[in-house]
Amino acid sequence: MNRNEIWLVRHGDTAWSRSGQHTGWTDLGLLGEGEEQARGLGDLLGGKEFAAVFSSPLKRAWRTCELAGYGERAEREENLKEWNYGSVEGRTAKEMGERVPGWSVWREGPPDGETIEQVSARAGRVIERALGAPGDVVLFAHGHLLRILACCYLGLAPREARLLALSTASVSVLGWEKDQRVIRRWNVTREGR
């Protein structure tokens, strides 16, 4: 396995990312501001050449990839789709907490959706593919999936992803320090959030 860096890019703002609604497989597009953010990601990525570019097929991630300047090289990767939230789809954590006191997607998971272990298994397949590439790789995807992927990369339990905040239109980098997998950069945005 190569010691590639894996660059993680979360898509720009959507109506539901703004409102805090769980957005799994609902195929929302970017807001106008989300498109502007996506264009700005090109600056954050600095025109870096990647050995491979993979994107979730969902519109918000794919469009972010295109607007950041990587759409022509990108391959759709089904395993990069966001967590399937089942009956939590479109609901906020506050709404869920009113129905089930103390509810957290990280503890209980979404009823009728994917388990965190299923999402983690998909993330593991992406990591394996990325580390098999002949150089650094960039992934355009979604908040919870990328947080879980980072934990899998580091050998942490997927539930620990609850500790890794990830803004829309952000860039993070997973890499190496000697023989240890590490986070090189996390949650970098143009706004410095």
Image (cartoon, helix red, strand yellow):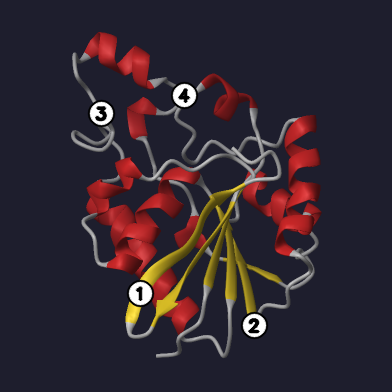
Q: Quadrant of the C terminus?
A: top right
188 relative to 78 in the view: left or right: right
Q: Amino acid at mark 1?
A: Arg
Q: Amino acid at mark 4?
A: Gly
Q: Amino acid at mark 3?
A: Ser
Q: Position of residue 57 (x, y in %)?
A: 60, 55
Q: Amino acid at mark 2?
A: Ala
Answer few, some or many: residues within 10 Å of disc 4's Cα (few below 14, many 20 plus, some between 14 and 19).
some
Q: Earlier in the sequence, mark 3 or mark 4?
A: 4
Q: Earlier in the sequence, mark 4 or mark 1?
A: 4
Label 1 to label 2, Cα distance in Å?
Answer: 19 Å
Q: Which mark is residue 90?
A: 4
Tag 3's secondary structure? loop
Residue under pointer 1: 181
Residue under pointer 3: 104
Are the residues at dot 3 and dot 1 in contact (C-beta closer than 8 Å)? no
Answer few, some or many: residues within 10 Å of disc 1's Cα (few below 14, many 20 plus, some between 14 and 19).
some
Label 4 to label 2, Cα distance in Å?
Answer: 35 Å
Are the residues at dot 1 and dot 2 in contact (C-beta closer than 8 Å)? no
**Residue at figure coordinates x 53%, y 36% from the top left:** 26
Tag 2's secondary structure? loop
153 relative to 21 in the view: left or right: left
Direction top: furthest residue: 98
Residue under pointer 2: 51
Q: Earlier in the sequence, mark 4 or mark 2?
A: 2
Q: Earlier in the sequence, mark 3 or mark 1?
A: 3
